[in-house]
Image (spheres, grey):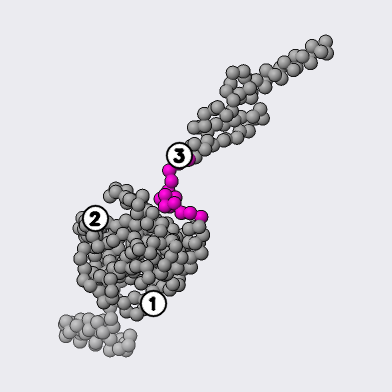
Amino acid sequence: MHRVSVGFALTGAVVTWVLLVPGAAVGDPPASTRPTTRAATWTTTAPDVSVTVSSPVAASARPRSLADRLGYTDNEKTVLGATRDGVRKIDETGLYVTLGVAARAAGNLQFDRDEWSQLDRPAYTSLLTQPKRWRGHPLELTPTIFRVTKMTSGKQLNYSNFWPKDRPVWRLDGVIGHKTQPVIIYSVVNPSEYLGQGKPGKEEDQTDYNRGQAIRAAAIFYKDVIDTDCDGATRHYPLVMAWQLSDGDEVMALRGSSDSLVSKLAPVAILLVVMAAGFYYLRRWMTQSRQKKSHGPRYKPLRDEIVPAAAEDNSANSLDEHVDPELAAAIEQYRHEKGLDESD
């Protein structure tokens, strides 16, 4: 009897194991042949305990960010991590590393007109106050350029293992939105076809655009650098590396769309303000008119009026002037006979 009960217990355990443990049934494929395209949830015999295993195929299918698509190597990340902000020095290893990344992007990361929205457009102050946050990050700029300088290795640039010595770089000096927001752009593509023809500058390989030329740039933020402006003042500049440029017509179209919206809304806003002011004064005038009609002048009894003493004397004198002389004489004689004083 004891053996039978033990046999039933073993049989029940085997059935429970087959039913509850996945893959234990006969004919199930081994774990190595199961599909890996979806995440699987394995539930143990303990209640409310589950373990989720993510498929490596699903993880690799996630879309990469623009920063990931730039393809930084570990060495490049190390060099950029050692970059110092708020200094005058520009020509250092990090400069050529960022130029090399921009050159790679110029070959495999070009945007159509509708794809520029993928780039971030950080505030100007954020680039200067949080340079570590934006370092190596792709962004969009729409500056106005006033000067372009062609730079080559051995002249304006040093030789570096991270940058080909026979490949030029163009430095673009301009402003973003306002004259108080200057920017320095190192471009790996020639900006002449986007900026048009300018005037020769004072220095060699320099072109000036006195009126300023609008341009659109896809660039990588490098650092916050100190430089001297045209007036001799020391200022902070965001330094970026551009890998794609767009002409000023597209920039002006973007600015024109926002300007046209403002120009359309401005008359409506002015009209609303005028209507609100008119309604306020009209309501105020109607309220005052209603109060005047309902209350009117306040009634004041004669007894409440204070008559000055001079007015009383004048009234007494005026009464004396109108008394009959014979009556006045009779009253005076009567008073004399009765011995009445004038004071009585």
First in sequence: mark 3 vs mark 2:
3
Q: Which mark is residue 250?
A: 2
Give the percent coordinates (x, y) of residue 334.
26, 85
* Amino acid type at mark 3: Ala
Q: Which residue is mark 3?
A: 61
In this rendering, would 192 be left or right of 25? left
Q: Give the side of residue 254 with respect to residue 229, left or right.
A: left
Residue 13 position within the rendered picture, expressed as x and y whole percent measured from the top left: 71, 20
Instruction: Answer with mark 2 or mark 1, whichever residue precedes in sequence.
Output: 1
Residue 75 sits inside the magenta stretch: no
Measured as percent of width and height from the top left, residue 156 is found at 36, 71
Marker count (numbered): 3
Mark before the other along the chain sequence, 3 or 1: 3
Q: Mark 1 sits on what residue? A: 234
- Quarter of the image for residue 313 reads bottom left
Q: Amino acid at mark 2?
A: Glu
Q: Which circle marks residue 158 in the picture? A: none
Distance CA(mark 3)–CA(mark 2): 34 Å
Q: Which residues are magenta?
A: 60-74
Is 109 above or below relative to 223?
above
- Residue 284 in view, yes or no: no
